[in-house]
Image (cartoon, grey):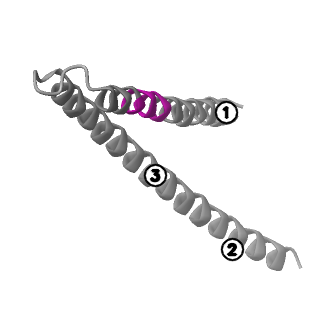
Amino acid sequence: MIELLLTVSGILNILLIWYIVQLLRRFLGFQEELDEFADKLKEYEGHVEVVNNLERFYGDETLANLLRHSKNMTEECKKVINVILEIENEEEELYGEEAEH
């Protein structure tokens, strides 16, 4: 009976480890995509700023609004990235404490 329970426990542990690894891969992939998106958004913001400062378009309210919107979107992306990094740090601290005990 004990051998059966140990076998079932071992199989469950292996499945749970596999599942956790899959979740971490997805999470890291999501974080990389978000970082790339934030970089592209920052580039776009810079491009709009250059166009807005051109003599031909200087003072155009539509471009000024677009630039403000780009800056707001960049800030929102930074907030999301910071939340993800905070979650990662909390998990590392939690698992680090568990390993010490």
Residue 91 is situated, as x and y percent measured from the top left of the image, at 62, 36
Instruction: For mark 3, give the secondary structure.
Output: helix
Task: Select label 1 or label 2 by which is in front.
Answer: 1
What residue is shown with label 2?
11
Count every numbered label the image shows and give the total. Answer: 3
Q: Amino acid at mark 2?
A: Ile
- Of the two numbered discs 1 and 2 on the same chain, state the one appearing first in sequence: 2
Magenta span dominant secondary structure:
helix
Task: Select label 3 or label 2 by which is in front.
Answer: 3
Quarter of the rendering occupied by the N terminus:
bottom right
Distance between the Cα atoms at labels 3 and 2? Answer: 29 Å
Displayed quadrant of residue 74: top left
Q: Is residue 34 left or right of residue 54?
A: right
Q: In this view, which residue lies farthest toward the right?
A: 1
Q: Nearer the viewer, residue 35 or 76?
A: 76
Check whether the beta carbons of the residues at disc 3 and disc 1 lie within 8 A of each other: no
Distance between the Cα atoms at labels 3 and 1? Answer: 22 Å
Q: Nearer the viewer, residue 42 or 1?
A: 42
Relative to 46, residue 8 above or below: below
Q: Residue at x 28, y 41 (%)?
A: 40
- Numbered range of the magenta stretch: 69-77
Check whether the beta carbons of the residues at disc 3 and disc 2 lie within 8 A of each other: no
Find out whether residue 30 is within the magenta segment.
no
Find out whether residue 72 is within the magenta segment.
yes
Q: Is residue 34 left or right of residue 98?
A: left
Q: Residue at x 60, y 35 (%)?
A: 87
Instruction: For mark 1, give the secondary structure.
Output: helix
Instruction: For mark 2, give the secondary structure.
Output: helix
Residue 30 is tagged as: 3
Residue 94 is tagged as: 1
Q: Nearer the viewer, residue 92 or 47?
A: 47
